Image (cartoon, rainbow, N blue to C red):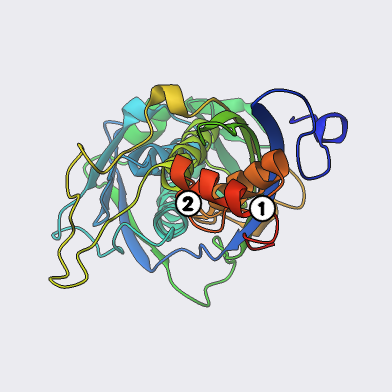
C-alpha cells in the first residue's frame, strides 16, 4: 500500500533542495476485551424486535453494531428492530471507554438475540412440521434449513406468538463459553512525510494503517474509527501541545487560538486496511477505538528522521524543534 520497498532510503534524503522526504513505520499492540454487559431482547407478534441495553453511543457506531448483530442473526432489516439504549432503567452495561464497549455489547446482544430467536423457533416449528433446532432465520424468512421451501415469512412466524411475545436476556462476562470477545490486537502504520529543512515545517503526504481487531462487525465504522485515529495522531504528532505554568499549574493555552489542531489540509492522504478472514474472525470482537492512536507519533517521528537524517526527540514535531535538531546534528538528537 505504501510502496515501501521501492521508496525507502537510508536515513537522510540526499536529493538537492530544501524539501526532504522520508518514510517511517511503527507497530502497536493493545488489549480491547469487552466489558460485562446485559441485554434484553423481545420479539413481538407484530414482527418488531425490541432490544434494551444500558449502554450509550458517543458517536462511535455502537447503535449500528448492535443493530447489525441483531439483524444478521435474525435475517431481518434494521427497520424491524427497535433499539433502546442510554438509560439506567435498561439492563446494565459498561461505560463507553477503554475500547471495551464493542466486545461487551456485541456479545450480550448476540446471546440475547440467539436465545430469543430459539424461543420463536419453538413456537413456529409445529407449523413447519419440524423441530426447533432444524430451523433458521434468513432473508426475512423462518425456514427449515434442509428444506428451504418450507418457510414462513418473518411476519407470519412472529404472528404465531399471538399475545405472548418472547423475551430472552443475553449476557457477557468473563469466563463465558464460547467467548465472543477477546483481547490483544495489533496494527502497523507507515508515514510518508516531507520536511522543509529551511523552515522546519513537516508535511504529511500519506499515512497507511493496517489494523487487526478480531471479528469486524461493520467495516465502514471500523475504517472510520481508524481514520479518526490517524487524524488524531497527526494532530498530536505535529501540533497539539499543552503549555503549563510551572508556578500556578494552570494551562496557558486553553483555547483554539494557541492550542492548535490539525486541519483538513494537514492530514494528507489516509488509507486503512482491516485484517479480516481466517486467523482473525474466529478471535471474536475486540475493541478498536484506541489502538490505532498509538502508532502515528512513532511512525511520523521515524519518517522525519528518515527524511532529515537526525532524530527530533520530542513531540509535537514543531518547526522550532525540527530546526533545533538539525542545528545540533546527528549527535544532538536521540538515536
Identify which residue, 20 or 88, lies in the foreground. 20
- Say whether disc 1 or disc 2 marks the residue closer to the N-terminus: 2
Q: Quadrant of residue 258?
A: top left
- Alpha carbon distance from label 1 to label 2: 63 Å
The quarter of the rendered structure image containing the N terminus is top right
The quarter of the rendered structure image containing the C terminus is bottom right
Identify which residue, 147 or 332, lies in the foreground. 332
Residue 101 is marked as none
Q: In this rendering, is residue 221 above or below 216?
A: above
Q: In which quarter of the image is residue 29?
A: bottom right
Question: At 49% across and 50% down in the image, what residue appears?
Answer: 293
Residue 313 in percent (x, y) is at: 56, 58
Residue 144 in percent (x, y) is at: 61, 36
Report which residue position mark 2 lands on: 114
- Does residue 130 appear in the picture of this structure? no
Report which residue position mark 1 lands on: 329
Q: Which residue lies furthest to the bottom in this view?
A: 175
Question: At 57% across and 39% down in the image, what residue appears?
Answer: 136
Neighbour tally class for label 2: few under 14, some 14-19, many 20 plus, Cα within 10 Å: some
Identify which residue, 52 or 219, lies in the foreground. 219
Identify which residue, 30 or 16, lies in the foreground. 16
Determine the secondary structure under disc 1.
Answer: loop
Determine the secondary structure under disc 2.
Answer: helix
Question: At 35% across and 64% down in the image, what residue appears?
Answer: 37
Q: Which of marks 1 and 2 is in front?
A: 1
Amino acid at each position: 500500500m505504501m510502496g515501501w520497498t521501492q521508496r525507502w532510503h537510508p536515513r537522510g534524503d540526499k536529493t538537492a533542495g530544501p524539501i526532504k522526504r522520508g518514510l517511517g513505520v511503527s507497530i502497536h499492540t493493545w488489549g480491547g476485551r469487552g466489558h460485562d454487559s446485559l441485554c434484553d431482547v423481545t420479539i413481538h407478534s407484530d414482527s418488531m424486535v425490541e432490544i434494551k441495553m444500558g449502554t450509550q453511543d458517543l458517536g462511535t457506531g455502537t447503535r449500528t453494531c448492535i443493530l447489525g448483530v441483531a439483524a444478521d442473526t435474525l435475517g431481518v432489516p434494521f427497520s424491524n428492530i427497535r433499539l433502546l439504549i442510554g438509560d439506567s432503567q435498561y439492563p446494565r452495561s459498561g461505560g463507553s471507554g477503554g475500547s471495551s464497549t464493542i466486545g461487551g455489547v456485541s456479545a450480550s446482544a448476540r446471546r440475547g438475540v440467539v436465545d430469543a430467536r430459539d424461543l420463536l423457533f419453538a413456537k413456529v416449528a409445529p407449523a413447519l412440521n419440524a423441530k426447533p433446532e432444524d430451523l433458521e432465520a434468513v432473508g426475512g424468512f423462518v425456514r427449515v434449513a434442509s428444506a428451504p421451501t418450507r418457510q414462513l415469512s418473518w411476519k407470519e412466524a412472529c404472528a404465531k406468538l399471538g399475545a405472548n411475545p418472547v423475551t430472552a436476556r443475553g449476557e457477557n462476562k468473563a469466563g463465558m463459553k464460547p467467548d465472543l470477545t477477546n483481547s490483544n490486537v495489533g496494527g502497523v502504520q507507515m508515514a510518508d512525510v516531507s520536511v522543509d529543512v529551511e523552515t522546519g515545517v513537516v508535511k504529511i503526504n500519506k499515512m497507511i494503517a493496517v489494523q487487526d481487531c478480531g471479528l469486524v462487525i461493520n467495516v465502514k465504522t471500523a475504517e472510520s474509527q481508524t481514520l479518526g485515529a490517524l487524524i488524531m495522531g497527526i494532530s498530536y504528532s505535529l501540533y497539539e501541545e499543552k503549555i503549563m505554568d510551572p508556578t500556578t499549574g494552570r494551562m496557558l493555552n486553553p483555547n483554539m487560538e494557541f492550542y492548535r489542531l490539525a486541519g483538513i489540509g494537514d492530514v494528507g492522504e489516509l488509507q486503512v486496511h482491516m485484517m479480516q478472514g481466517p486467523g482473525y474472525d474466529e478471535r471474536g470482537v475486540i475493541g478498536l477505538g484506541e489502538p490505532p492512536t498509538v502508532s502515528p507519533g512513532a511512525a511520523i517521528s521515524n519518517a522525519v528522521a528518515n527524511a532529515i537524517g537526525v532524530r527530533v526527540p520530542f513531540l509535537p514535531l514543531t518547526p522550532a524543534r525540527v530546526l533545533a535538531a538539525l542545528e545540533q546534528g546527528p549527535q544532538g538528537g536521540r538515536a
